[in-house]
Image (cartoon, helix red, strand yellow):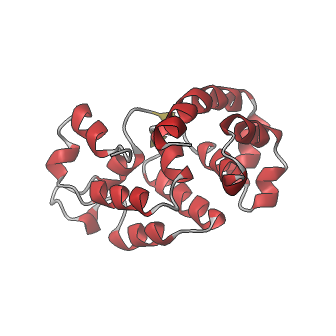
Amino acid sequence: MSKFDLRKRIATVVPPWLRQLEERKGDRAALRRAQQGADVYAIELAHRLADQLDLGREESDAPFFLAALLAHVREPQARPLIVNLAETASNGKPEDGKLKPQRFARLLQANDLPDRLRLFRRALQLVDGRADVINLSYIFLTWAENATKREFARVYYAPRSLHDAGDDAVAATSSTDA
């Protein structure tokens, strides 16, 4: 599946799935507690997301872990997670921002799904659960690709003025399709 097709499928599947999750408080709570594959495999709504995304056998576990991550989104918005995380203190130093450089480096190194889930959850907590769910889903599902991590890092280290430039600049810097 091409990157464009994956984004399109995510945009079609994830928002309605999140609305279903809002109605099913028990599933949401169970997904929020999930840490291992066995935890998410036991939740029917996670199976629905995996079936609807239909990523194939090589990525068969990732949608289940994505379901657990999406349960932590409190406020879906148009602003990507990395832009929210990259906000620095008024002095412009990354070490004074929401996501410290050491934690960011650990996030970049996360390769297995349980570790990726744990670190992305922590990142979401740092921004009070605010993220673009389509962008977040795409980033999480393609995290094993170096191009995704490289783009994530590029936005993290972009000058503060770029983050403050408005929605057009944010959209341009948050796309990993380029």
Q: Is residue 146 visible?
A: yes
127 or 43, which lies in front? Answer: 43
Residue 111 vertical placement versus 126 (above, below): below
Judge from the rendering whether residue 116 lies leftward or rightward of residue 27; answer left or right: left
Q: Position of residue 132 (x, y in %)?
A: 45, 37
Q: Position of residue 123 (x, y in %)?
A: 47, 56
Q: Residue furthest front?
A: 1
Q: Position of residue 67 (x, y in %)?
A: 67, 45
Judge from the rendering whether residue 27 lies leftward or rightward of residue 68; answer left or right: right
Q: Position of residue 23 (x, y in %)?
A: 72, 26
| Figure quadrant of residue 78 | top left
| Figure quadrant of residue 151 | bottom left
Q: Is residue 129 visible?
A: no
Residue in the picture at 68% in, 56% down? 58
Residue 178 vertical placement versus 35 (above, below): above
| Figure quadrant of residue 131 | top left
Residue in the picture at 72% in, 42% down? 50
